[in-house]
Image (spheres, rainbow, N blue to C red):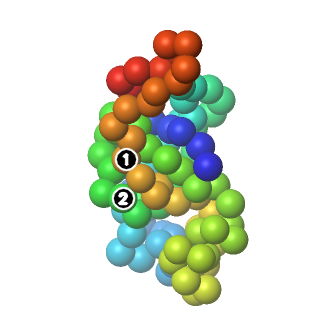
C-alpha cells in the first residue's frame, strides 16, 4: 500500500473493458510529510477521491482482485481510501 496524492484525471477513448465506468486518476507517491517521491502512475478510484486528495493506493494485483472480484481485468493500482491526516512519532507527519 502506498501513500499518494491525486494529481489529476485520466481520460481515454480506447481502453480495456475492465475500465468501463471506472474513474481513473493520476497519482504520485508522497512521504509522511507530503514530499513527492518517484514518478506518477495511474490508479482506479474506489474511494471517491479528487484532485489534491491524499489517498491510500493498493498496488498489488491480488489485493485488487480481492476487492473488485476475479473479473477485475488488468487493474493493478486501486485507490482504497482518502487520508485525512498522517501522524508520525517525532513530528514528521501532520496534515497533508
Residue position for label 1: 82
Question: Mark 1 Cα within 10 Å, few/some/many (few <14, many 20+)?
Answer: some
Q: Is residue 53 above or below residue 11?
A: above
Q: Nearer the viewer, residue 89 or 64?
A: 89
Instruction: Name the quadrant containing residue 8.
Output: top left
Which residue appears at 44% of the width and 30% of the height? 86
Q: Is residue 48 left or right of residue 40?
A: left
Q: Is residue 86 visible?
A: yes
Q: How many marks?
A: 2
Kindly identify the residue that appears in the image at 38 percent across and 25 percent down.
96
Judge left or right: residue 67 versus residue 48: right
Percent position of residue 57, x then y: 53, 50
Task: Say what secondary structure mark 2 lies in.
Answer: loop
Instruction: Indicate which disc, 2 or 1, sits on the residue closer to the N terminus.
Output: 2
With respect to residue 9, does 36 lie above or below?
Answer: above
Residue in front for this viewpoint, 32 or 74: 32
Please identify the residue farthest to the top as the structure is shown.
91
Do callouts 2 and 1 mark residues in contact (Cβ within 8 Å)? yes
Asked if residue 46 is positioned above or below residue 82 in the image, the reply reads below
> What's the residue at 55%, 83% (across, down)?
69
Question: Alpha-carbon neighbours of circle 2 within 10 Å: few (<14), some, or many (≥20)?
Answer: some
Q: Residue at x 53, y 74 (%)?
A: 67
Could you tell me which secondary element the residue under label 1 belongs to? strand
Q: Position of residue 4 (x, y in %)?
A: 50, 38
Q: Position of residue 93 (x, y in %)?
A: 48, 20
Q: Is residue 4 left or right of residue 51?
A: right
**Circle 2 sits on which residue?**
47
Can you name the residue that lies furthest to the bottom here? Answer: 71
Amino acid at each position: 500500500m502506498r501513500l499518494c496524492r491525486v494529481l489529476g484525471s485520466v481520460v481515454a477513448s480506447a481502453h480495456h473493458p475492465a475500465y468501463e465506468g471506472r474513474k481513473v486518476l493520476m497519482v504520485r507517491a508522497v512521504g509522511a510529510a507530503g514530499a513527492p517521491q518517484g514518478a506518477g502512475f495511474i490508479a482506479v478510484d474506489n474511494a471517491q477521491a479528487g484532485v489534491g486528495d491524499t489517498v491510500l493506493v493498493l498496488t498489488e494485483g491480488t489485493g485488487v482482485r480481492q476487492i473488485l472480484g476475479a473479473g477485475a481485468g488488468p487493474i493493478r493500482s486501486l485507490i482504497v481510501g482518502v487520508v485525512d491526516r498522517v501522524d508520525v512519532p517525532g513530528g514528521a507527519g501532520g496534515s497533508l
